[in-house]
Image (cartoon, rainbow, N blue to C red):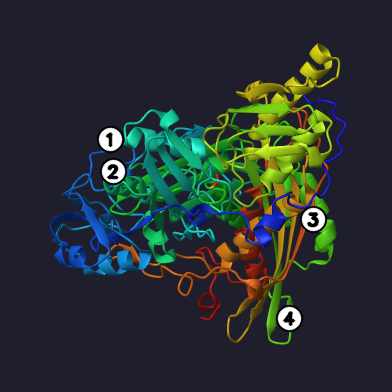
């Protein structure tokens, strides 16, 4: 499948082609488009987690000069039914979670809207709520699938209990991770315009086509009448993959007021309205012989979902493919809580699952008296244990070995508390990393004018990853044109359909469609026009549907994460002066933007390890640390040296360009590497994230 391509720009560290626009403020983000006669919406959110709205007194708000209308279930237009009832804004008086929209003010300015929203008085009939995830919850149930239909809930291979009972070395531990919130710098924002052209929405999202389809369904419009424009996005991390209540509210407000309506969430509102990573309780049991060969892996996950929609994360799925244990058990049980719907957050599934599995592998290595890298190498599978297929490429062992060499692993004394400098205990740790190769169908068109200027159209999104640049490089090389002569047009649902910027699938899938479109144009120009561009120009299109080789090969990226951790003996303070990530993730289109993706993922892994936790107040069902003062994210002072390395990997099966996707793997395994290093430094095993200083003071 891999094509022989003369790569002139692929592989070159090209600067972001939109870098100047972004740095100079010329790049327009959703909320920044000037629109004539805009009105502004500001929501009122429920203060109870479950019950109903018994009365709304909006008289004071309505009396405030500048207020255009106050919307609620009492006067809202009817929407179509949606699979995720969280999107059914103002359709009933029911309250399903704390922070739900119960009313909204639309006003002449955002300040008036916000002030008037404070004046709306909402009365509730409160019902008992259930908001806490607990391992002993009687109401835990087995969802029909996890990962929204993409993975089976449970898998039982071989005789796990028998193998665990007879194992020479047995590990049985429970690991927990807290709820965490996606916090892109740009909060969710929309400008909705409902006029004769249909509904036009400037919106911050990860995939205009998906948003278009949801809006079309909700407002009972043909999809062609919906136009989603998404030129620049200040991050998403999964929270902007699908529509959330704010965009529904913006469109509804435009419908009612017949004005363009602007709505941008505040940071605080993000904590109840745009998803979060589910907390997890993960029991891992590993059985091994005295040489560290795994005989059984059991990974049982408990997590939460909502009453509005069943989002069941695929946390244990990663344990199905990592190691060559002949007996395997992976299960997911879910609590349906009176909470907002959890959603995807960078490396959903793998991120939480690998914290537990890779912490457990470290514990097993210690129990067996085997080096943790050697333990992983001894359990390297020759084929994918889940499907029985060969891996299209699997660079885990190479990454571990290269990382060990670069990190200086051979000098490591495995004894905990062996290294100390002054009052600081020093430890090092390692963990594996992995992320699947995902695809989604995409189409693209390519055209050239008589001067030799190319345009390529696809409804892709660049959420800050550098996709706009990498895709231009791909197009230019296939067209055999200089980069400057190729203009890539993305981020508009009127363009050829494409999947979202998620699942690290963009470069693979959009890139393949662009490859086909550009190839078609190039071939047409050569075969039909003798290489001479006709006066009226020339165009062609191409699609990508599916990779047929997925039926024969397991396709995943792999990596190895290394961490050095310093922990203060007196205060428990934790510093991470050094991280190293070595990845095998296929062909790298742009080394500069790819480096940032890996480094960004690792930085977030550090943040997950040490800081991030959304704190629930079970009395009210809300996350109380709902801002950057209370929800800590790693900042410059927390981050030491982060070295990013990738290995040459030539995978002929993944797509014509050999790319695998790099957006998410950087976060996977980082927290485990840090926890393992913290154990090595102190002899104290932290199985409950985040790793805070109190956990070392006993
Ligand atoms: Mo990613 S969590 O698939 O945006």
Of the pair 671 and 441, the residue shown nearer to us:
441
- Mark 2 / mark 3, whichever is N-terminal: 2
Q: Secondary structure at mark 3?
A: helix
Q: CA distance from mark 1 to mark 3?
A: 52 Å
Q: CA distance from mark 2 to mark 3?
A: 49 Å
Answer whether labels 1 and 4 touch (C-beta < 8 Å): no
Q: Which mark is residue 88?
A: 2
Instruction: Assess disc 4: are there few (<14), some (14-19) or many (≥20) residues with their C-alpha within 10 Å of its C-alpha.
Output: some
Q: CA distance from mark 4 to mark 3?
A: 23 Å
Q: Nearer the viewer, mark 1 or mark 3?
A: 1
- Mark 2 / mark 1, whichever is N-terminal: 1
- Mark 1 / mark 4, whichever is N-terminal: 1
Q: Quadrant of residue 127?
A: bottom left
Q: Secondary structure at mark 4?
A: strand
Question: Residue 423: where, in percent of width, then height?
Answer: 68, 86
Of the pair 297 and 6, the residue shown nearer to us:
6
The residue indicated by pointer 1 is: 81
The residue indicated by pointer 3 is: 403
Q: Nearer the viewer, mark 4 or mark 2?
A: 2
Q: Secondary structure at mark 2?
A: loop
Answer whether labels 4 and 2 touch (C-beta < 8 Å): no
User: Is 314 on the left-hand or right-hand side of 640?
Assistant: left
In this rendering, the answer to whether 13 lies above or below 475 is below
- Mark 4 / mark 3, whichever is N-terminal: 3
Q: CA distance from mark 4 to mark 2?
A: 57 Å
The residue indicated by pointer 4 is: 420
> What residue is at 16 percent from the left and 49 percent from the top?
74
> What residue is at 62 percent from the left and 64 percent from the top?
606
User: Is 85 on the left-hand or right-hand side of 367?
Assistant: left
Answer yes or no: disc 1 within 8 Å of ligand 1.
no
């Amino acid at each position: 499948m891999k094509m022989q391509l003369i790569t002139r720009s692929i592989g070159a560290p090209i600067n972001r082609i939109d870098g100047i626009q972004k740095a100079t403020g010329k790049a327009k983000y959703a909320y920044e488009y000037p629109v004539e006669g805009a009105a502004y919406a500001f929501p009122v959110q429920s203060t109870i987690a479950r019950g109903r709205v018994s009365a709304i007194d909006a008289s004071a708000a309505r009396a405030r000069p500048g207020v255009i209308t106050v919307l609620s279930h009492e006067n809202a237009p009817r929407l179509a039914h949606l699979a995720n009832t969280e999107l059914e804004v103002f359709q009933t008086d029911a309250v399903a979670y704390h922070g739900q929209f119960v009313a909204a003010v639309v006003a002449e300015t955002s300040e008036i809207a916000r002030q008037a929203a404070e004046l709306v008085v909402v009365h509730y009939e409160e019902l008992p709520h259930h908001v806490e995830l607990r391992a002993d919850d009687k109401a835990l149930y087995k969802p029909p699938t996890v990962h929204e239909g993409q993975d089976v809930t449970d898998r039982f291979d071989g005789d796990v209990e028998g193998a665990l009972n007879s194992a020479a070395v047995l590990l049985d531990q429970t690991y927990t991770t807290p709820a965490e919130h996606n916090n892109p710098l740009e909060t969710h924002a929309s400008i909705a315009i409902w006029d004769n052209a249909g509904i036009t929405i400037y919106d911050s999202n990860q995939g205009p086509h998906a948003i278009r389809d949801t809006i079309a369904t909700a407002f009972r419009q043909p999809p062609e009448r919906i136009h989603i424009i998404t030129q620049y996005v200040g991050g998403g991390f999964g929270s902007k993959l699908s529509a959330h209540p704010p965009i529904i509210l913006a469109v509804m407000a435009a419908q009612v007021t017949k004005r363009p309506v602007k709505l941008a969430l505040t940071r605080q509102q993000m904590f109840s309205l745009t998803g979060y990573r589910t907390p997890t309780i993960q029991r891992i049991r590993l059985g091994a012989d005295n040489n560290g060969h795994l005989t059984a892996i059991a990974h049982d996950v408990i997590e939460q979902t909502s009453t509005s929609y069943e989002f069941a994360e695929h946390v244990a799925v990663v344990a199905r493919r990592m190691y060559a244990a002949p007996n395997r058990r992976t299960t997911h049980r879910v609590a349906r809580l009176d909470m907002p719907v959890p959603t995807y957050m960078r490396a959903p599934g793998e991120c939480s699952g690998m914290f537990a599995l890779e912490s457990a592998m470290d514990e097993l290595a210690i129990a067996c008296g085997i080096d943790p890298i050697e333990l992983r190498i001894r359990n390297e599978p020759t084929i994918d244990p889940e499907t029985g297929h060969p891996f299209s490429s699997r660079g885990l062992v190479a990454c571990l070995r290269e990382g060990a060499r670069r990190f200086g692993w051979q000098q490591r004394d495995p004894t905990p508390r062996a290294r100390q400098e002054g009052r600081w205990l020093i430890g090092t740790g390692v963990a594996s990393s992995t992320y699947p190769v995902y695809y989604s169908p995409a189409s693209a068109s390519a055209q050239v004018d008589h001067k030799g200027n190319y345009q390529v159209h696809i409804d892709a999104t660049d959420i800050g990853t550098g996709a706009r640049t990498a895709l231009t490089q791909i197009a230019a090389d296939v067209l055999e044109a200089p980069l400057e002569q190729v203009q890539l047009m993305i981020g508009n649902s009127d363009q050829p359909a494409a999947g979202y910027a998620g699942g690290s699938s963009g470069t693979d899938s959009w890139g393949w469609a662009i490859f086909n479109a550009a190839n078609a144009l190039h071939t047409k120009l050569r075969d039909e026009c003798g290489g001479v561009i006709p006066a009226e120009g020339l165009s062609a299109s191409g699609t990508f549907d599916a990779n047929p080789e997925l039926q024969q090969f397991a396709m995943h990226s792999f990596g190895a994460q290394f961490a050095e951790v310093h922990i203060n003996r007196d205060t428990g303070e934790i510093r991470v002066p050094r991280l190293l990530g070595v990845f095998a993730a296929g062909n790298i289109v742009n080394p500069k933007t790819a480096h940032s993706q890996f480094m960004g993922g690792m930085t977030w892994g550090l943040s997950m390890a040490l800081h991030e936790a959304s704190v629930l107040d079970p009395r009210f069902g809300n996350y109380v640390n709902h801002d950057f003062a209370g929800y800590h994210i790693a900042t410059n002072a927390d981050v030491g040296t982060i070295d990013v390395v990738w290995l040459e990997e030539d995978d002929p099966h993944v797509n014509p360009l050999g790319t695998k996707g790099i957006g998410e793997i950087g976060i996977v395994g980082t927290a485990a590497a840090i926890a393992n290093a913290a154990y090595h430094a102190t002899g104290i095993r932290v199985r409950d994230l985040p790793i805070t200083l109190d956990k070392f003071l006993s």
